[in-house]
Image: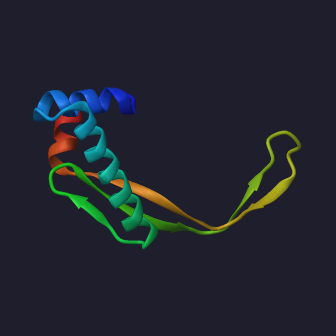
Amino acid sequence: MNKAELIDAIAAGSGLTKADSKRALDAFIDATTNALKKSNRVALVGFGSFSVAKREARKGRNPQTGKEITIPAKKVVKFKPGAELAKVVK
């Protein structure tokens, strides 16, 4: 499902117009992005939670040359599904 299909599904399920559904989805994405930028956790009970984790620097290999390289540390977004979502997807 892409963003346009998600907007259509939100509009159909909520009775909102497609334009209102797009604004609502964009607002959700902006709010979630801003919270994660601040390293805050976003929890949606029953659905899951988004959080930021720090991945430490590590050694790796360049697959073309086989030469060992250092992969720098960085922050990554993690998603942990809630119990209800996990049960449905199971």
Camera-side residue: 24 or 70? 24
Q: Does the rendering let one see residue 46?
A: yes
Left or right of 69 on screen, residue 79: left
Where does residue 55 sit, x and y in percent of width and height? 56, 65
Q: Quadrant of the N terminus?
A: top left
Q: How is the image coloured?
A: rainbow
Where does residue 47 sit, x and y in percent of width and height? 20, 49
Left or right of 58 on screen, residue 27: left
The residue lying at 70 percent from left, 65 percent from top is 72
Q: Does the rendering let one see residue 90?
A: no
The residue lying at 13 percent from left, 31 percent from top is 13
The residue lying at 16 percent from left, 56 percent from top is 45
The residue lying at 32 percent from left, 67 percent from top is 41
Image-quadrant location for residue 33:
bottom left
Left or right of 88 on screen, residue 34: right
Residue 21 position (above or below residue 33):
above
